[in-house]
Image: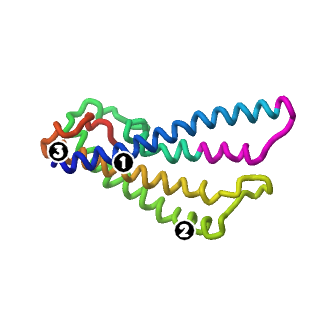
């Protein structure tokens, strides 16, 4: 059981790292937006590639950090009953929520997104603007980053839940309430 706990903690660490990278994108996003406003105000000039970069950073922040957000229980949850439940009951809800909702939704998104992303990479899709960023295929790949990071976190939540359900709560670092 210790191996399962280590695997789950390793998955948590991956999403923690992705989240930290995404947090730098947030700072960069603010600084670039400030620069765009300043340049527009001072010179009445706009740089399309820089303006498009905001979309890429937004994508990284919101899609890339989804697994990190799930790790830290930041997603919206209706927990009228959940917050008052025992850790074992929370574990059951988290496990079944992952198996019945999270994983099927991620698989559906992946099945629809993968051909879309592959096609974009095949043609090296670029901006419709001549002076824009010609890496739209990377932007579309953020969908896959969302799926992978969230799927990894879903597996981690499921493993943590199983440990709690089997009575190995001491191997789980944080309370199981940090799940789906």
Mark 3 crowdedness (10 Å alpha carbons): few <14, some 14-19, many ≥20: some
Q: Nearer the viewer, residue 135 or 106?
A: 135
Residue drawn at 62 percent across, 47 percent down: 56
Magenta residues? 41-58
Residue drawn at 48 percent across, 59 percent down: 109
Q: Is residue 74 above or below residue 10?
A: above
| First in sequence: mark 1 vs mark 3 | 1
Query: Mark 1 or mark 3, which is nearer to you?
Result: 1
Residue drawn at 26 percent across, 50 percent down: 7
Q: Is residue 125 left or right of residue 82?
A: right
- Expressed as whole percent of the image width and height from the top left, the position of residue 80 reads 33, 32
Furthest residue to the left?
Answer: 167
- Expressed as whole percent of the image width and height from the top left, the position of residue 59 reads 58, 47
- Expressed as whole percent of the image width and height from the top left, the position of residue 162 reads 20, 48
The kind of secondary structure element at disc 2 is helix
Residue, disc 2: 115
Q: Is residue 70 above or below residue 121?
A: above
Residue, disc 3: 165
Measure how far apart labels 1 and 2 are at the Cα level: 24 Å
Residue, disc 1: 153
Furthest residue to the right?
Answer: 44
Which quadrant of the figure contains the C terminus?
Answer: top left
The kind of secondary structure element at disc 1 is helix
């Amino acid at each position: 059981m210790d191996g399962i706990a280590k695997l789950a903690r390793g998955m948590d660490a991956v999403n923690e790292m992705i989240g930290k990278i995404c947090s730098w994108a947030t700072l960069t996003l603010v600084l670039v937006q400030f620069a765009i406003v300043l340049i527009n105000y001072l010179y009445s000039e706009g740089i399309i590639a820089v303006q498009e970069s905001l979309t890429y950073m937004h994508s990284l922040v919101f899609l890339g950090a989804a697994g990190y957000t799930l790790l830290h229980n930041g997603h919206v949850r209706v927990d009228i009953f959940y917050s008052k439940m025992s850790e074992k009951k929370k574990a059951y809800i988290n496990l079944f929520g992952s198996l019945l909702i999270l994983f099927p939704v991620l698989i559906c998104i992946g099945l629809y997104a993968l051909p879309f992303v592959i096609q974009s990479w095949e043609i090296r899709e670029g901006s419709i603007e001549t002076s824009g960023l010609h890496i739209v295929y990377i932007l579309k790949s953020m969908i896959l980053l969302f799926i992978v990071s969230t799927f990894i976190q879903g597996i981690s939540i499921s493993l943590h839940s199983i440990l709690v359900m089997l009575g190995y709560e001491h191997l789980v670092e944080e309370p199981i309430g940090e799940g789906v």
